[in-house]
Image (tube, rainbow, N blue to C red):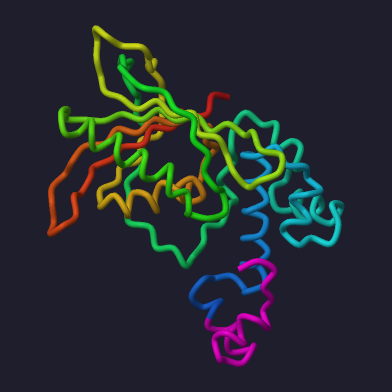
Amino acid sequence: KENISVSDVASISGFTKRYMQKIFKEQVHLTISSYIKRRRLTKAAILIKLTKKSFYHIAMDLHFSTQQSFTRAFSREFNVSPLHFRNSAYFDCSKLLPNLSLKLKEYKIKKTRLSTFKLKALSFNLKIGLLNNNSTRADKFRFSEVNSILSKREEAIIVTTLKPDSKLENTVLLNIKIGFKDDTNFNFVAHNMPCWEISFSGSWDDYRTFGYNFLISLEFNATTYFIEKIKNHNKKGNDVYYDAKIYIPVEIN
């Protein structure tokens, strides 16, 4: 919730402020005020990196009293200025704080090397919201295209580049290539690279939630370019389960 206070949390929970603080810190290992502050700065970091909004508008949207107070708070938390954070080649995820009300399914992560492959793909540009999970059009489109490929092929591949383009809205442009491996009729080549491999299994709804939030859970510098390889796993009741691997290039010093 935007601009919430410790008193608001206590009032909503029905506990006294002191007791609410106590049980929250026992569970989360942060005070409520620290959690609220870090979540607000996490949202700021996302908007700085993935939009072209001015720092003033980001500060006002997130209820900082002035741009100067926002800059000081951000610089203390991330050890760099908002401008340096925006201009960096990588997205420093190490100090981002996930929304603890979201329970992401377990995943595995390891360093590996992605071999060169050739892809026959269609290219699209889609916008998604950054501070909510309501990008229904993009979700439905990805779901439809992936399942269309998996009805004929073993594996669907998505290559995504996040492109900041909005000066007014909390949105980011996704440049997406969706297709399958084809050594003959290819129109895109993904080159050999060292990368982080993130493995996930679950329903499409699980994967959708994971996809919106996994970057915030990482503890390394990530690029705004990544590759997904998705396969059908099995069917449980009415749900089709998927095996997905996400590849993020390793930072090159």
Viewer-proximal residue, 210 or 249?
210
Residue at the spot 30% in from the left edge and 24% down from the top edge: 179
Residue 250 in view, yes or no: no
Q: State yes or no: residue 7 in magenta.
A: yes
Q: Position of residue 54 (x, y in %)?
A: 77, 42
Residue 138 in view, yes or no: yes
**On the picture, is 151 further left or further right than 221?**
left
Using the image, determine if residue 12 lies above or below residue 77: below
Residue at the spot 46% in from the left edge and 51% down from the top edge: 213
Using the image, determine if residue 116 lies above or below residue 160: above
Viewer-proximal residue, 217 or 54?
54
Identify the magenta region: 1-23
**On the picture, is 19 further left or further right than 88?**
left
Q: Quadrant of the N terminus?
A: bottom right
Q: Quadrant of residue 103?
A: bottom left
Residue at the spot 29% in from the left edge and 49% down from the top edge: 204
Q: Quadrant of the C terminus?
A: top right
Using the image, determine if residue 164 lies above or below residue 97: above
Q: Position of residue 27 (x, y in %)?
A: 48, 75
Q: State yes or no: residue 234 in magenta.
A: no
Residue at the spot 20% in from the left edge and 33% down from the top edge: 150
How many discs appear? 0
**On the picture, is 15 further left or further right than 64?**
left
Q: Position of residue 118 (x, y in %)?
A: 31, 14
